[in-house]
Amino acid sequence: MQRYRPQLSFVLVLVLGYVSLDWCYRQVPDQILADRVYRWAINQVAAGIINSVAPTAQVKVDAHRLVSPRATLEVVRGCDGSGLLFLLVAAVLAFTASWSHKLVGLLVASVLVYVLNEVRVITLYFVLVSYPRWFVPLHTSLIPVLIMALSAMFYLWWTRWVSAAASHVSG
Amino acid sequence: MSPAKLALRIALAAVIALMVTQFAGHAMVDALLLPLASITDTLSAVYTAQLSWQPGATDMVRITAQLFDGPLALAPLGIHNGAEVKAAIHLEHILLPVVVLYAVLGAWPQPDWRRRIIVMLAGVPSALLAVALTTPFLLAGKIEMLLQQRAAAMGVPRAEPGLLRWMLFTEGGGRWLLAIVLALLIITVVDIMLPARSNTSAAGLPHRAQREGSERRGERGRGAVDKLPTTPR
């Protein structure tokens, strides 16, 4: 049983870390998320990219909504990549590593989640416009699972980098 | 295992799990509808709940909640005793924790097929547990959200019910955490009960990643598995 203590403590820190981050996130009012975070950090960027890729789309930002003549996509609490970010942050914090390595892990995880979520929002907009029947399976299952696979790839890369750095120091 | 290979394995396992759940999802909901309805009905003292399910074009599981006066005074909310409130969720919402659970279990390296089959079978009760901890709360939580909105619109203060907090937690990403933690626990429990003969068994991602660091340093074999190097802080 002693052998499995690292795994069990990893799971415990992962859960506690996630729950703590989620609790903090719940304290932020919906209005602030919609008017500030979703409007500026997610939708303005997504609308800019969509309009540059497809100039006829005429996508506009209405707070937490991406509005065009052909579709309206709402970004609501939970659609901002927060769940994935909290998972990665908690997993990075749960792993035995130096604080500098953890800081790098947290920064890269944040950038990765932001980029993946923007790609997700933009993809979902185009799916909603062109293939609305595919919206639910893509939104609910396929894209989340793909994002999970990419996040796992990052996480394994990071743990390997940490382990290699540790072996370099000790060896 | 390289990070790219791991990502590929997870994606592949998830696609297989998705295909299986798409194929067996209807039968699964058919079988689970009654127990899920029982759980959903016990979650709230404000209403009695009935579930129905429309397989096919919509694939929606619907909840019909009949509200009654009791712990929640309905009159200030402008709702009459016995009023019905309806909400629905898509089949995909029910299946996601199962897909995530089996994506992790399927992608996790195992030394042999016997062990992989045991892990997969151990996933069945865990998948049921994951569904029981998410679906009824999601359905009941949708009703609670409607009641919260009504209370806010009518200016009636109403504390957020615990089941709504849990529903928001799971929908925000907690169901991922739940599925991943269940998968890690299954893998660890199987590892405890059936210790692997070779060092290819996986007792946990951090453990394995650190072991790989040891192996690169030339510490091959069982000793390297058990030795957890302490990285500098």
Image (cartoon, helix red, strand yellow):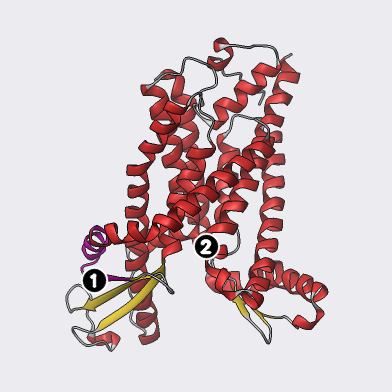
- Is residue A36 shown left or right of residue A13? right
Q: Horizontal and vertical percent for residue A57?
A: 75, 81
Say if residue A65 shows up in the picture.
no
Q: Amino acid at mark 2?
A: Thr
Q: Horizontal and vertical percent for residue A68?
A: 69, 83
Instruction: Indicate the quadrant containing the C terminus of chain A: top left, top right, bottom left or bottom right.
Output: top right
Observer-nearest residue: B106 or A21? B106
Which residue is at the far front?
B23
Q: CA distance from mark 2 to mark 1?
A: 24 Å
Determine whether B190 is above or below A73 in the image: above
Circle 1 sits on which residue? B50
Residue B46 within the magenta-colored segment of the rendering:
yes
Rate crowding at label 1 as few (under 14), some (14 to 19) or many (20 or more) other CA atoms within 10 Å: some
Determine whether A52 is above or below B84 in the image: above
Magenta residues span: B35-53
What secondary structure is found at the residue carrying circle 1? strand
What secondary structure is found at the residue carrying circle 2? helix
Residue drawn 33% across the image and 60% down it? B29
Circle 2 sits on which residue? A140
State which chain disc 1 sits on: B
The answer to which quarter of the image holds residue B5 is top right
Determine whether A39 is above or below B173 in the image: below
Q: Amino acid at mark 1?
A: Gln
Residue drawn 72% across the image and 46% down it? A108
Residue A24 within the magenta-colored segment of the rendering:
no
Instruction: Indicate the quadrant containing the N terminus of chain A: top left, top right, bottom left or bottom right.
Output: top left
State which chain disc 2 sits on: A
Q: Horizontal and vertical percent for residue A134?
A: 57, 69
